[in-house]
Amino acid sequence: MHYLSPSLNVMVAAARKAGRALVRDFGELENLQISRKGPADFVSTADSRTERILVEELTRARPGYGFLLEEAGVVEGRDKTHRFIIDPIDGTTNFLHGIPQFAISIALEREASLVSALVFNPVTDELYIAEKGQGAYLNDRRLRVAARQQLSDILVASGAPFMGKQGRKEFLAEVDGIISSTAGMRRFGSAALDLAWTAAGKFDGFWERNLKPWDVAAGILLVREAGGVVTDLDGRDHMMDCGHILAANQVLHRPLLELLRKTQE
């Protein structure tokens, strides 16, 4: 087994504890799907409870660290150099519909630099972890991004704007460009897992617009530690600020970036 830093060990323990409750919740969804009220309130409660468990466990182990949370927003800590970035359920709509494609996502920043990452699907027990300079792993197996080099051979993932969210026009143009030039595209509904799967070589690339830091923070480090390249859609390192992202291997990143740019001309 590879070495885990004390901080990453703490993150893993917190995720596994929160994940056990999520698995129980997931098992209850089948009964809730047929109720008149539906499962939406139940899922909202699960989301909030998962975040609370993670914060409580991480605060107990690392008192003073700050947080950036999907539900509660910014929580300032006494230690201004460390911050956890958390999405308690990335892929909430999948969870809502009983689809086992969702994850707990936790990243740790030290002095504004990502140093530890975790993406955990508690239903499949897939635990993706990474530490800066130490590589990326899936359940103790070292990860490397896919080695494919031709656009015509690759499978690319993305996320689609829905229910009137901004970016529909840009997305449809990008999809047209991608499906015209590659072997396929997938939309699975969890940016954290899409990035983890890119790190694992299941996807050759991933792009999306209008994301939040908690959607991508852990996945960025996973891809980079698996040997990939991650930038925003302008080729810069501002993904967590601007909300758009492209991840791929070192050969494919530039052609994909240029392809996506051409769709907006």
Image (cartoon, grey):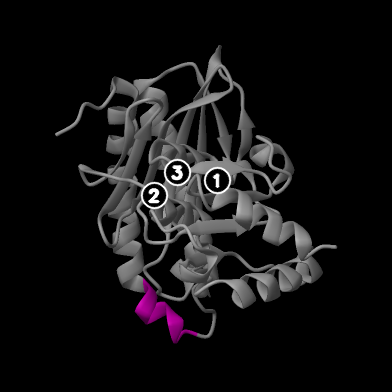
Q: Earlier in the sequence, mark 2 or mark 1?
A: 2
Image location of residue 79, percent across then percent down: 53, 12
**Of callouts 3 and 2, the N-terminal one:** 2
Mark 3 or 1, closer to the camera: 3
Q: Residue at x 73, y 73 (%)?
A: 172
Tag 1 secondary structure: helix
Residue 257 lies, in percent from the top left, at 66, 53
Residue underneath mark 1: 216
Q: CA distance from mark 3 to mark 1?
A: 10 Å
Q: Which residue is tagged 3?
A: 223
Q: Is residue 89 above or below residue 135?
A: below
Where residue 245 appears, as percent x and y from the top left, is 63, 49
Query: Which mark is in front, 3 or 2?
Result: 2
Disc 3 residue type (three-letter): Val
In the rendered image, the quadrant that contains the C terminus is bottom right
Helix, strand or loop at label 2? It is loop
Q: Residue at x 43, y 54 (%)?
A: 198
The magenta region covers: 29-35
Of residues 183 and 55, the one nearer the viewer is 183
Q: Which SS type dominates the magenta stretch?
A: helix
